[in-house]
Structures are given as C-alpha cells and as structure tokens.
Image (tube, rainbow, N blue to C red):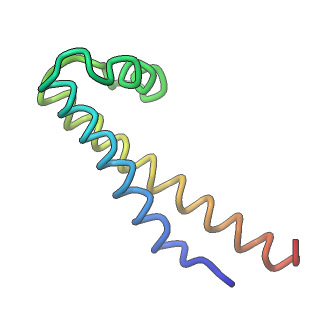
Amino acid sequence: MKFSITGLALASGILWGLAMLGMGLANLIWGSYGQQFLQTMSSVYVGYHATRSVAGVVVGTLYGAVDGLIGGAVFAWLYNQLAKLGV
C-alpha cells in the first residue's frame, strides 16, 4: 500500500490547524482552558505567543496548518520509502 503524499499532507495540515484553532478559540472563551498546551506550542513555534487574542489564534492556526502539512508529507514520504524496502 502506498500513501498519497499530497493527501496525507493536506489531511494532517487541516487537522492540526483545526486543533490549534479549536484550542485557541476555547482559550478565548473560557480563559485558562488549554493554557498549558498553548504555552507549549509557543515554545515550539517561533513567533507564536500564547496570548488571548484573535491575532494569536490566527497565527497559531497558521503555524499548526503548516506544521501538520510538513509533518504529514514527511510521514507519507518516509512510509512510502520503507514500504519499497519491504520493512
């Protein structure tokens, strides 16, 4: 079986972007909800700060989408390479 690199990249980007969007919006609505998660993500994503603002939610969503896109593409590519070897 072979993964579609584009398909997995898009699916991963959409899912991780939505996860960041959902957590950011939940944090805007309920204050401290997900604060530890957002602070962890701010230590990973340079330029993203876990502030309670719409701009922060947008930046976090974009970082999540790009990160998921790259991660999904790398995963699918690596899987396809290992599948060729019969591992």
> Which residue is found at the position 29% from the left and 44% from the top?
62
Q: Quadrant of residue 49?
A: top left
> Which residue is found at the position 12% from the left and 26% from the top?
29
The residue positioned farthest toward the bottom in the image shown: 1
> Which residue is found at the position 33% from the left and 48% from the top?
17
Q: Is residue 85 left or right of residue 52?
A: right
Q: Is residue 82 left or right of residue 77?
A: right
Q: Is residue 25 left or right of residue 43?
A: left
Image spot of residue 30 (x, y percent): 16, 22
**Residue nearer the viewer, 26 or 64:** 26
> Which residue is found at the position 25% from the left and 41% from the top?
21
Task: Judge whether 51 appears above or below 3 on screen.
Answer: above
The residue positioned farthest toward the right in the image shown: 86
**Residue nearer the viewer, 87 or 31:** 31
Task: Judge whether 26 appears above or below 50 on screen.
Answer: below
Which quadrant: the N terminus? Answer: bottom right
Image spot of residue 23 (x, y percent): 28, 34
Say how many tags the image has.
0
Which quadrant: the C terminus? Answer: bottom right
**Residue nearer the viewer, 15 or 84:** 15
Image spot of residue 78 (x, y percent): 70, 64
Image spot of residue 85 (x, y percent): 87, 76
Task: Judge whether 11 appears above or below 34 on screen.
Answer: below
